[in-house]
Image (tube, grey):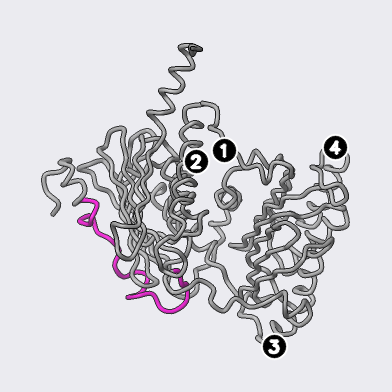
Amino acid sequence: MERCHPSEVYELFVRHMNTPRVVVDNGVCETATLVQVHSARKHGVLLEAVAALSDHGVCVRKGYISSDDGRWFMDVFHVTDAAGCKVADADKLLVRLESSLAAAAAAADALPRPAGCDSPAKEALCLLELIGVDRPGLLSEVFAVLHDLRCSTVDAKAWTHGGRVAALVFVRDEDTGAPIHDTARIRRIESRLRHVLRGGARGARTVLLDAAAVGNLDRRLHQLLSEDREADRRAPAEGPATAVAVQEWGERGYSVVTVSCRDRPKLLFDVVCTLTDLDYVVYHGTFDTDGDHAQQEFYIRRLDGRAISSEGERQRVIQRLQAAIERRASEGVRLELRISDRRGLLAYVTRVFRENSLSVTHAEITTRGDMAVNVFHVTDVAGRPADPKTIDEVIHGVGTESLRVDEERWPRLCSTEGDAGGGAGAGLFSLGSLVKKNLYNLGLIRSCS
């Protein structure tokens, strides 16, 4: 029998001990699928779990994060599909969670990635990172330039917020389907796109990267806009406000972050992502939804184990969380395009938007085989709701069988329409919430009052 080298045995032992354990159960709760994650306390593992749930398209209805303040965590999520039902493909959800968390644990320990954790779908592409001043028709100009330079756009995501735009665009050679490696061509692409982005006071940039070097795309968009200081220029959100507060619990050395706002898909991801990228560790937390209203509370410390120590730091956390929550709150009419992919498709469709005085606030471009499946959120050029007659003209211009208004948007449990129960500011958690009960049950505090 072949014997393993001691170093290989140790590597396998470390991986086994640090790989999170996942349970997905449809039998415990009548209305939701229960997901439990038991993991060693490593920075970023909670984010990986939440990201895997978001990528699977499930809605987190409620849950909690609990720790013994040592090296081990337990995360519990009650999730449903978009229609508010239990997750039908629980086995696939389990596989996705285990794969994502195993990759995160391996990365944290500087171990080789386990088999099956790579993302082969985008490895043969190049990635353009775009950041600049937003203006009506900008995406139309970007896709027109790429088409002119014979770059085929395979996938893309674009967000606008605070007068800025950030986009991730996966491209390949339009003729060969191969990645773009020619240095002179890359410089030409970057030069043309910088001219389109125009820069402004803070400048604009394009970065051509290997797609395999990028992780979660939503996280990268958050990072691009945060690095661009777009939160400093954000206008007050219309409608119910996003209420964020940071309090201190000196007895236990925690900072307590509370969020109260309208519920929507990926809300938990956006909050956890922001806290993680600000280098905070979530030790305990609860999150719950009531209709279309969400309340979240997190007990955090910095990576060095200390709580938030200054008013400036407290305001920074509040501002960054508000921006992260609001920048994904898609404005405008949601249009879905499903059509056979062809050269110049995006340049044509976005030109139709521009010629009809529509501005794209969010875009998600996907290619599945020979089909283009794209989603656009559009307003008029002033950021107001688009005229229904204009939308109708655009639909007839592109094709009524291909382009349609998504009137459902997000079904009932994930709805972003209607009034939030009690207003966004109502119901902010206090320091006597469910987290204290969890700490009391763990024997870490003497009283939960």
Tell me where the magenta segment starts and ends, as one range.
414-436
Badge number at residue 116: 1
Whether residue 253 sits left or right of residue 274 in the image: it is left
The residue tagged 3 is 389
x%, y% of residue 439? 20, 46
Residue at 63%, 70% (x, y): give it.
Answer: 377
Residues at marks 1 and 2 touching, judged by CB atoms closer than 8 Å:
yes
Q: Secondary structure at mark 4?
A: helix
Quick check: can you spot residue 399?
A: yes
Q: CA distance from mark 3 to mark 4?
A: 46 Å
The mark nearer the N terminus, 4 or 2, is 2
- Secondary structure at numbered mark 3: helix
Identified by mark 1, the residue type is: Gly
Residue 410 image point, x, y percent: 50, 71
Q: Main secondary structure of the magenta part?
A: loop
Q: Residues within 10 Å of mark 1 (few under 14, many from 20)?
A: few
Circle 4 residue = 183
Amino acid carrying mark 2 in the image: Ser
Mark 4: give few (<14), some (14-19) or many (20+) Cα within 10 Å: few
**Residue at 63% of width from left, 75% of height from top?**
383
The residue tagged 2 is 99
**Residue 78, x across and y down, in percent:** 35, 58
Q: CA distance from mark 1 to mark 4?
A: 32 Å
Q: Determine the secondary structure under disc 2.
A: helix
Instruction: State if disc 2 and disc 3 touch (CB < 8 Å).
Output: no
- Furthest-front residue in view? 1
Distance from label 3 to label 1 (Cα)? Answer: 48 Å
Amino acid type, label 3: Lys
Quadrant in which the C terminus is drawn:
bottom left
Task: Label 1: state its secondary structure.
Answer: loop
